[in-house]
Amino acid sequence: MDNIPYAHPAWIEIDTKQLRQNLRIMRQHIGEHPKLLFPVKANAYGHGLVPTAQHTADLVDYFGVSCLQEGALLREAGIHNPILVMGAIHAQQIPALAQYNLEVTISSLYKAKLLVEKGVQEQITDPIKVHLEIDSGMNRTGLRISTAPAVIDYIKGSPSLDLVGIYSHFATAATPGDPFFAEQSATFLQFLHQQRLIDDPSILCHFANSAAVACHPETHLDMVRPGLLSYGYYPREDLPNALREIKPCFAVKARVSYFKTIMMGHGVSYNHSYKAKKQSRILTIPLGYGDGYRRSLSNKSTVILKGKHYPVIGDICMDQFMVDIGDDSGYVGDVVTIIGKEQDASITMEQISDTCDTIPYEILCGFNERLPRIFT
Ligand SMILES: *Cc1c(COP(=O)(O)O)cnc(C)c1O
């Protein structure tokens, strides 16, 4: 660990080999035809936006981001893959979206017209590549099916816009057998057939998030957009066996910063929510909720030291927390694993998110920029 920036004593380790393996397995699963869009929004689900893209650019067709800012960071870092901005765009962003050659999502006639007007005002020369978003039932963004044909005609009739994609997003793909999934699926597929978009080779039809990529091959179409699963987490339990070699590549680690022995009955940390049941050795770990290690894990999680679990005790602070190692040995500078595997012991993202009463996505994105990402 000599390459930790500023030798910061807590960090996130990304297993580059496993991440790449995950994407290869994904590619094998989808077969020859569909393109692979790798969602790297929200700092690549906490893995680190730029290094994640740099380490995977040769394995994926597209990157998916949520906003201009993320796309610009990728371009500034020298990423040349097509990049789709999946979130909404705003009028002031249009010149930069064009300058960085980002593909944009259009989900209303208003936004399509805005692109055309700004294109004229700003003298943008190359047509802007757009993907039309259809709302097939998520009720977040996207055009209703009834209004979509007019917008398609408008885009096709605008020389400054190039319609390269059309997509929709599932609301309930992670729930096996959910009846609304079938309804949403039928709605969008029927629309693509009716409008003859499905067999237009110049337009990428795409629909599937992780859960649909894994379990519904009929939704793969021309491109898939698996985020969570590409990072190694299962969106649902009934995955096909071929995908079960996909594994997490993300670990949180830190070096012990302090050691002391406390007496029976003494309280630890704010509010003394933990009291030692006997004389005990206590380690301090330099990581806290200020890094994204949730305070609701206080007295509920463990860390792994030399292959063994030890309880997180007392309230987790902003920048540190404590661990009770009983009579065992552990010293300043020792490395502990807070999420991940060490020898035969492991603490999974799902255990952490269950304890926090949330989903792995939110825990992953919650780890912020203070922790360096080390790609091993
Ligand atoms: C985030 C996102 C995805 C990826 O979702 P996962 O559940 O992580 O696979 C796909 N499509 C769109 C439009 C998204 O915003």
Image (cartoon, helix red, strand yellow):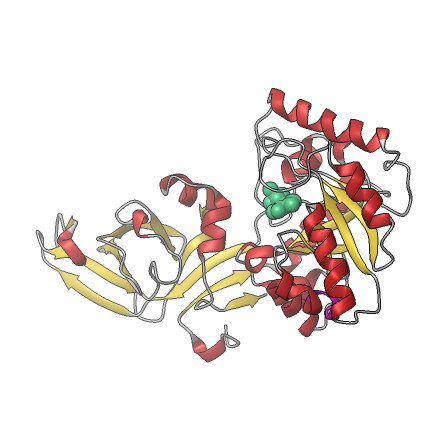
| Residue 23 appears left or right of 354 | right
| Residue 104 appears left or right of 291 | right
Residue 72 position within the rendered picture, expressed as x and y whole percent measured from the top left: 65, 68
Residue drawn where x is 81% and y is 33% of the image: 192
| Residue 331 appears left or right of 169 | left
Residue 101 position within the rendered picture, expressed as x and y whole percent measured from the top left: 76, 66
Figure quadrant of the C terminus:
bottom right
Of residue 373 and residue 1, the one placed in the foreground of this image is: 373
| Residue 274 appears left or right of 11 | left
Residue drawn where x is 40% and y is 39% of the image: 354
Q: How many marks?
A: 0
Residue 86 position within the rendered picture, expressed as x and y whole percent measured from the top left: 66, 51
For the stretch drawn in magenta, the main secondary structure is: helix
Of residue 52 and residue 1, the one placed in the foreground of this image is: 52
Residue drawn where x is 83% and y is 60% of the image: 160
- Residue 233 makes an appearance in the image: yes
Q: Where ligand 1 lies, by quadrant?
A: top right
Of residue 258 and residue 233, the one placed in the foreground of this image is: 233
- Residue 204 makes an appearance in the image: no
Q: Does residue 157 show up magenta in the picture?
A: no
Residue 325 position within the rendered picture, expressed as x and y whole percent measured from the top left: 26, 55
Q: Which residues are magenta?
A: 97-101
Position of residue 252 relative to residue 333, above or below, is: above
